[in-house]
């Protein structure tokens, strides 16, 4: 499938050294001539060479205002872009990756001032149209924290809510595993959404290779970084803004006072996203950050229902209807089962009871009288009709 020219340019820009999402957005906003000039200047600075020392063929392209695309020029300058449009499309197809751009994001992310210029994806993009809750926390989680994250992830998934996290060790991985567990029970349950800081072909941490594969098959993997991007430290805080922007509610399960998940909290608060925290023991360093958030006004989440209530999906009041009638004993219960949706006369019921239950006419009449007295039947002009469901 051919790649949209804007997506191709953004991809090639992202493949170059020193590129950040902000730089890519800026270059794309300049249009082709401005972007070429800006890129050549950066090449000059990086190589400690004045513009006059730029290779003659590149300089000629610039000075003669050649109509070649920015993407091709970038490929010539850095020699790091990966072939032409067809080769790029084939490369992404081989890795089962797709490119989505602004305008294709969920509204919350699409309207975000710091939205990524594009996202690479593998998996079910329809999950972005589901209700979404971010679950974040420390990499060095306690067993209690991991169990809690797993529980929240599973119950939210069972209620059709996509769990958004970062596929890191600890809380992230536990929340994803909980969502995967629910999705494996029924495809109606929402799969997990993982936003990673590397290229989608670079698994990090390495021990999550199996989990990474499962999320890509049953959920959705997302990254703003092109294939081949390694786990550079500065990309992880950048990744956190996407998790925050995709979340309708952000839940912090365990976080230390200096935890990276607090960066996601700040990003969420900047966007007006509701922040919830699971309280922990005051003696546990892993919960110091979450307890601080609660002290400072974050909503408390004791059970998954608390999060569902914040989403307007609270199920606690959806209890089975209460029936005060005592269940009819045998043989009245058998007679009641003879009357379904259509009203029947005494003779009709007696005939059915004789055929199926070998009951006498008198026993049937007595049984019908008891059922009517206890509220299971009503008799109108000689016709017996069932009241409500048994």
Image: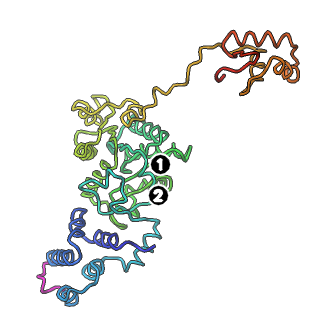
Q: Which residue is mark 1?
A: 191
Question: At which x and y percent is residue 253?
Answer: 34, 37
- At label 1, counting other C-alpha atoms closer than 10 Å, the crowd grade (few under 14, some 14-19, many 20 or more) is many
Magenta span: chief secondary structure: loop
Marks 2/1: CA–CA distance: 10 Å
Question: At which x and y percent is residue 271?
Answer: 25, 46
Disc 1 is placed on an element classified as loop
Question: At which x and y percent is residue 191?
Answer: 47, 48
Q: Is residue 153 left or right of residue 295?
A: right
Which residue is at the front of the view, 65 or 252? 65
Q: Are marks 2 and 1 in contact (CB under 8 Å)?
A: yes
The residue at the point 88 percent across, 18 percent down is 358
Q: Quadrant of the C terminus?
A: top right
Give the mark, 2 or 1, whose residue is nearer the N terminus.
2
Is any part of residue 178 visible from this angle? no
Count the numbered circles shown.
2
Q: Which residue is mark 2?
A: 123
Q: Residue 308: within the magenta?
A: no
The residue at the point 38 percent across, 47 percent down is 164
Which residue is at the front of the view, 311 or 199? 311
Which residue is at the front of the view, 367 or 270? 367
- Residue 203: numbered disc: none
Q: Which residues are magenta?
A: 47-55
């Amino acid at each position: 499938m051919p790649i949209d020219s804007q997506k191709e340019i953004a991809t090639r820009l992202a493949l170059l050294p020193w590129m950040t999402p902000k730089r890519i957005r800026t270059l794309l906003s300049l249009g082709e001539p401005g972007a070429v000039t800006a890129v050549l200047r950066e090449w000059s600075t990086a190589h400690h060479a004045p513009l006059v020392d730029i290779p003659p063929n590149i300089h000629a392209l610039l000075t003669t205002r050649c109509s070649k695309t920015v993407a091709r020029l970038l490929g010539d300058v850095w020699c790091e872009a990966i072939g032409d449009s067809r080769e790029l499309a084939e490369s992404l197809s081989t890795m089962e990756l797709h490119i989505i751009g602004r305008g294709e994001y969920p509204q919350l992310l699409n309207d975000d001032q710091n939205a990524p210029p594009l996202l690479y994806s593998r998996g079910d993009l329809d999950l972005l149209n589901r209700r979404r809750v971010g679950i974040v926390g420390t990499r060095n989680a306690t067993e209690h924290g991991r169990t809690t994250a797993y529980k929240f992830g599973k119950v939210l998934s069972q209620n059709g809510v996509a769990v958004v996290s970062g596929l890191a060790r600890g809380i992230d991985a536990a929340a994803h595993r909980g969502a995967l567990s629910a999705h494996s029970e029924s495809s109606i349950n929402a799969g997990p959404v993982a936003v990673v800081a590397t290229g989608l072909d670079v698994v990090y941490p390495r021990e999550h290779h199996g989990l990474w594969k499962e999320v890509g098959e049953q959920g959705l993997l997302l990254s703003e970084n092109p294939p081949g991007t390694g786990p550079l430290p500065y990309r992880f805080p950048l990744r956190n803004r996407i998790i925050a922007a995709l979340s309708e509610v952000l839940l912090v399960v365990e976080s230390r006072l200096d935890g990276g998940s607090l960066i996601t909290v700040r990003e969420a608060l900047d966007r007006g996203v509701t922040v919830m925290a699971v309280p922990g023991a005051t003696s546990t360093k892993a919960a110091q950050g979450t307890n601080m958030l609660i002290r400072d006004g974050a909503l408390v989440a004791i059970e998954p229902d608390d999060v569902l209530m914040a989403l307007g999906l609270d199920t606690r009041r959806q209890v089975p209807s209460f029936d005060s009638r005592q269940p009819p004993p045998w043989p009245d219960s058998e007679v009641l089962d003879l009357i379904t949706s259509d009203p029947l006369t005494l003779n009709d019921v007696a005939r059915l009871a004789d055929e199926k239950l070998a009951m006498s006419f008198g026993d049937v009449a007595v049984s019908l009288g008891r059922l009517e007295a206890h509220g299971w039947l009503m008799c109108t002009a000689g016709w017996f009709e069932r009241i409500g469901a048994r």
